[in-house]
Amino acid sequence: MAPNPMNRTLTDILIMVKRNLLRYRRMPQLIVFSFIQPVMFVLLFAYVFGGAIHTDTKYINYLIPGIIVQTVIFGAMMTGVGLADDLSKGMIDRFRSLPMARSAVLAGRTISETIRNFFVIIVMTLVGYAIGFRIEHGFFKYFLAILLTLLFGFAFSWVSATIGLAVKNVEIAQTAGFIWVFPLVFASSIFVPTNTLSGPVKWFAEHNPISYTTNTVRALSLGTPVGDNVWYSLIWAAALLIVFVPLAVYRYRKIS
Amino acid sequence: MSHQVTQYIKEARHHGLTNEQIMKALTDAGWQAHEILEFVLEPPRPAGASADAIISVRGISKQYDKTKALDNISLEVKRGAVTALLGPNGAGKTTLVRILATLLLPTSGEATVNGLNVVTQPQKLRSAIGLAGQYAAVDEVLSGRENLDMVGQLYHLNPATAKARAAELLKQFDLEDAADRPVKTYSGGMRRRLDLAASLVNHPKILFLDEPTTGLDPRSRFTLWNVIRELVEEGTTVLLTTQYMEEADQLANHIFVIDHGHIIAQGTANELKKQVGGDVLELHMTNHDDVSQAAELIKEFGDGEPQANSSNGIVIMPTSQGPSILVEVVRRLDSAQLKLSDIILRRPSLDDVFMKLTGHGTQSNE
Ligand SMILES: Nc1ncnc2c1ncn2[C@@H]1O[C@H](COP(=O)(O)OP(=O)(O)O)[C@@H](O)[C@H]1O
Ligand SMILES: [Mg+2]
């Protein structure tokens, strides 16, 4: 009748993950739309701006790892939107009135967004392959790159969860959740090598956690040395989790 | 399973065994102590609470940033009956229900539900309650069946039991035809029924219903009333909030009238009506603008100030002078050339009680 609390928490998280993924399956348009923007970016940068950007390698091989990080970050930002939606529709009230694990709603959300992100990475890789992207250093390293990207996205989805629970409104969550991500994404090494930038923007781009992650993912894909990037990226992911998991859980408990 | 235990306890009590002895026998038989306590034995009762009170609220206050939503509220809810919190919009009904359903912490005061403290034992308490909030809390993308199934699993029913319970509830609430359609295709009444079904998945001892019929058409409202009556017959305790006098009058064994975070009156519907005393004279003016003039003319026959409502053309006044005044009232209005479409002398309704107690009507009755 009463399994141990750890099992119970896991079961509850699983139920929530199942629910969220079922929602995505019922609304495939959400998934399709989440691909349109990154595919546009790929085409835009590969065929329009790409010619003007000088990289050590074929630009498409430079671009795709960056696009993947970008897509995963934006995807992670859907966490807060989903939670705000659940809040405004009373679903969170329903869940909070049940004897389920307190952490399951948030963990279920962030894990389902991570699973969705995994599929997004696969699709973006295939899109890249169709227009000339190649993994140059074996699939195992690329797999490690995917894992790092997912971990980084998972950390960002807890930031997004905190925002979603704070603003409680889908439209505001959409704006507030994305607005601070844009400068992080564009002043980074996602589209251009940071040494082509100058002044404070260059400094910012070089110390941007998204750049560290992108550099690592790119190096693993191209087979160049990852250097310290991977450590900085992991430290950032850990730091974000240490700060935002408790903050999001605190917010969740304090919902009134 | 728990049935055997209940039976055993009944017999053991009959033979004069103490709770401690019963506990020992059951634990020896392999039952977990918390299972026995949670599901079978009577919950412990807080000091000062009466035997048949299943909810006990003592001095609860809730302060939001600026608003004091509840101001030192105390009340008791009787086991196995319907209790209504009756009050206008903003009275604090939702706040109180959310505190009792463990969704919100009180600023001060204490409350127990089924013997469990809402602040210190929320998780245990949640297994015993069901909540249908003011807005239907169901996942629009999932089907009705999937919604109920999910809730059942979150109550930790095993998957087969959860499925069976979902099917049972879909049948009970006349949702079988729509069971596998996404909820976004449901009507308002169907959503409410599904929401109520979701709150009943775990056979709650206590059911909280926050404005269960607001926004429903009369037919759906009537259906829901009957569902609530059936639940109470089966032994569920219901605490519902409402803005509708009629609803409290129809359903509730006991009514707490709440306004601005205070309980301003309580009792059965009849007891509350007696507080107004006498009768109520009701004038329906053909020309809605005549109300204040009419009120002025009939004032001297009343026990209190007449209430004139120009938006519906109705004047209401408590009186204890009986039918003899009707002739004189009609004569006066006639000589002032004020046209009546109807004149009624009736027993006071809960509306009148509310009007008298608060000096203002409820939202639903303007
Ligand atoms: N989350 C909140 N933050 C601030 N004020 C609130 C909040 N919820 C309710 N209130 C205020 O508390 C009072 C009581 O509200 P509520 O309990 O919803 O009343 P009712 O359910 O009777 O309409 C109202 O004045 C309302 O504006
Ligand atoms: Mg309310």
Image (cartoon, rainbow, N blue to C red):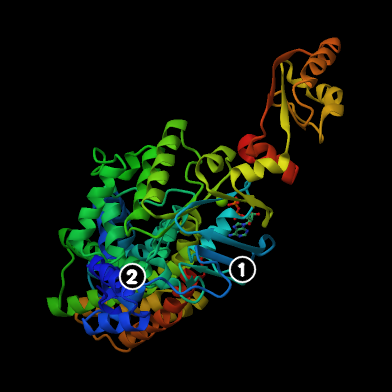
- State left or right for residue A46 relative to residue B359: left
Q: Is residue B249 above or below residue B313?
A: below
Of tags 2 and 1, the one toward the viewer is: 2
- State left or right for residue B321 relative to residue A104: right
Image coordinates of residue A171 in percent, x first then y, are 48, 53
- State left or right for residue A177 relative to residue A216: right
User: Who's the residue at 41% across and 66% down the image?
Assistant: B126
Dot 2 corresponds to which residue?
B40
Chain letter of the residue beneath label 2 in the structure image: B
Give the mark nearer the N terminus: 2 vs 1.
2
User: Who's the residue at 45% across and 62% down the image?
Assistant: A178
Image coordinates of residue A247 in percent, x first then y, are 47, 76
Q: Nearer the viewer, residue B157 or A154?
A: B157
Secondary structure beneath dot 1 equals: strand
The quarter of the picture where the N terminus of chain B appears is bottom left
Give the total number of marks visible in the rendering.
Answer: 2
